[in-house]
Every structure is written in structure tokens, then in C-alpha cells.
Image: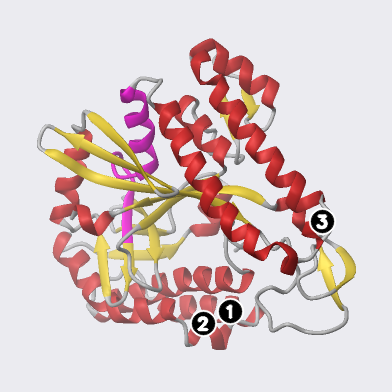
Amino acid sequence: MTTKRGAGSTIDHYIQDCAEIYLAARLQEEAEKHGVAISHCSAAQEGQWTEYATNRNVLSKFLGSKYKKNVDATVADLTLDIIKKYPGRKFYFTCVDAEFRNKNLKGDLLITFDNCEQISISVKNYKNGYDSLQVCSGTFNSTLVNFLFENTNCTPGTYIGTDNKKFKGSKRSVRDRYVKEIAPQLLPFFWELDTINDDIRSFYINSHEAEHWENVSTKWKEDCTSIGTQVATTIKEALTQIDNKLVLKRLLKQTGIVGDEHLLCIGKGEYLLSLTNEKYETLKNRLAHANRVDIRVSGQSLFYDICDLDGTILTINQPCTLQKNGAWHALNEDKFDGLREKNDKGKKVLLKWGQRRPAKSKELATSTNTYLRIKQAL
């Protein structure tokens, strides 16, 4: 199993991945205990998560993690819910996160039934509860591109143009040619975001002033707020220039709720399984009949209210900010004197605390995350 992409430390990703293997093993163990397992293999699955954690030196951290505690607190009731939903059936649970990701498929947990039917479930295990679910992330520019073009779902930042050819959103001349064909009124907004992106990268990646974090820590915080606020307003204004139904279509796709996908959320002793939750089914049906999106800005965040004739169904929150992505050395460690060796994208370099990493700093980026306020909607 490979490490998941996204923000956060590698160790935390290993622990999250291990929790998914552990979840499948515990569900299988519960199924065996209740006599509804197709085969008795939970012992072998226990060996899988133990081996995974041991090989990555995170076993002790995983055993004390909130991710494991979340599984332990919910797995017994979760299994009983599935048994009640499918009386008289037998099951087999497997973790398919790595397998499905390599095939560009979604899903982390696979339930196989005794008639060979299979259901894939996306698992979201949150340390601090699942009031809001993160469904995707991007940059300022990709956020706007996503509303106009289909994402390939294979390579991040790659889209399908009007001629059905793939293109990279970072290739501005190609992007502009496609945008000009379907929404030329949006070109000035894209150019504004391009300028913001270039200015940010020019200063923080290349300037002498930004070589050391101590010189720019205050400015960084101010920029996250001021630039994020500016960009949120820019994106809102851009989206008012295109068909609201297109905005709705893209947002519904991002939620993953309308369609064949299934969801399991775990956090703080609670869980939500779309297969068995009646309120979730009601939410799904309402979203299928949504007729508009109301867009508003508060601070540096966009809020999308997906509505039907009865009012707001679901609110999506999209904060706009900047992401360091490890650009400066050891900011998550206590300050130290002198130089320390650091592997910087495959090259060993000697750096002071808070000194800019020559290679890694090039991954500094603008950032948008998309959150569903799921509990509020249920």
C-alpha cells in the first residue's frame, strides 16, 4: 500500500492507511463472531495491518492513535447495522484503498456478499469528528478550471478540453484557448489568479527576504488572510458569469453523494454509513432534485448553498489560503542552532532552522479545500 497524497505528514498518512486495513480486519472479526462471515480470515487480516505498521515504524503510534480508537468505538454497532440491513446474508470485508487507487477507482472498503455482489465504500476517519468532510483540494486556478472542464480523475490538474483532448490546467495558453471557446468572459478572472500565483511564488520561493522563515512569518499570515479574501471574492464574481446549473452540476459531482458511491464516516465515537442511514438517503434524494446554488463570501472562504424548492439542502465551505508544503526547514520542530542535514527532494543539504529548502520550496502553492457540512445537513 502506498502513501496517500495530500496535506499532512507521511507518518500520519501511514497511520490513516493502517486504520483502513485495521477497519476491514475488525469488521471481518465481528462478522465471524456473529456467524455471518463467508470465510474466517480475520487473523490473517490482523497480520496485514500489524505488518504494515511495523514495516513503517508506526505500530506504537497507531496503537495509541485516535484513528484506531474511532474504529474500536464503532465497529461492533457498525457490523450490527450491516447485518440488520442485509438479514440472512454473509459478508467478507477487505481494504482496497491501494488497489482501487492504482486503478483510478474510488473506495477504501469493499464488502463482498455471498452471492458475489460487491459494494465499495469510501472511508473517512476523522480524529476530531466528521462535522465537515473534506472532499477535494486544489489551487486558486484549478478551482475555477474545475467548474468549466471535466477532470480526468487520473492525473491531478489534467482536464478534458472541448475537442476531447486532455490538457494540463497549468498550461496557460492551452487553458485560455479552451476557456475562450466556452466562457471568454472568464479570461480576466483567470489572468488575475495567474498574477496572484506568480507574485506569491516569486516572493516566497525566489526572494532573498524569504530565505528565512523568521523574516516572513508575519507577512505569510497576513497574506493568507488578505490574498485568500481577495481570491474568494474573485472566484465568486467569476462564477456569477456562467450558468448556475453548471456550477450546481460540478458541486454535486464533488460531493460524491449523488450517484453510486457509498460513504462511511467515523469520528469521536460516532459513525455515518450511507448504506444504513435514512437521513443520508433523504439528503441524497433532495440533492438529486436541487435546482440552484447560492454563492456567498465570508472572510477568505466561499460558501456554496445547494438548494431546492424547500431551501438549503447542503452547504459547502471552500477556504482560500496559501500552503507552505514544507518550504522552510523544521518549522514543526523546536528551534535549534547551527546546521542540520536534510533530504531535500533526493538531495542532501545543510540548513538552519527555518531556512528555505531549495527544492521543496518549489511546491509552495495556493490552496483551496472543499468541505461538506454534512452533520448540519442531516
Q: Counting residues from the N terminus, which is met first, the one under dot 2 or under dot 3? A: 2
Q: Residue at x 42, y 80 (%)?
A: 66
Residue 87 makes an appearance in the image: no
- Note whether 312 is above or below 114 in the view shown: above
Q: Amino acid at mark 2?
A: Phe
**Dot placed on the residue nearer the N-terminal end, 3 or 1:** 1
Above or below for 154 versus 292:
below
Q: Amino acid at mark 3?
A: Ala
Q: Amino acid at mark 1?
A: Ala
Residue visible at 9% across and 37% down in the picture: 310
Q: What residue sits right under mark 2 in the picture?
A: 62
Q: Is residue 344 left or right of residue 297?
A: right
Check whether the beta carbons of the residues at disc 1 and disc 2 lie within 8 A of each other. yes
Q: Which mark is residue 53?
A: 1
Categorize mark 1 by other alpha carbons within 10 Å: few (<14), some (14-19), many (20+).
many
Magenta-drawn stretch contains 261: yes
Mark 2, secondary structure of its residue = helix
Considering depth in this image, is 56 or 173 the residue closer to the camera? 173
Label 3 residue SS: loop
Callout 3 environment at 10 Å: few (<14), some (14 to 19), or many (20+)? Answer: some
- Return the mark for residue 359: 3
Where does residue 210 sit, x and y in percent of width and height? 77, 58
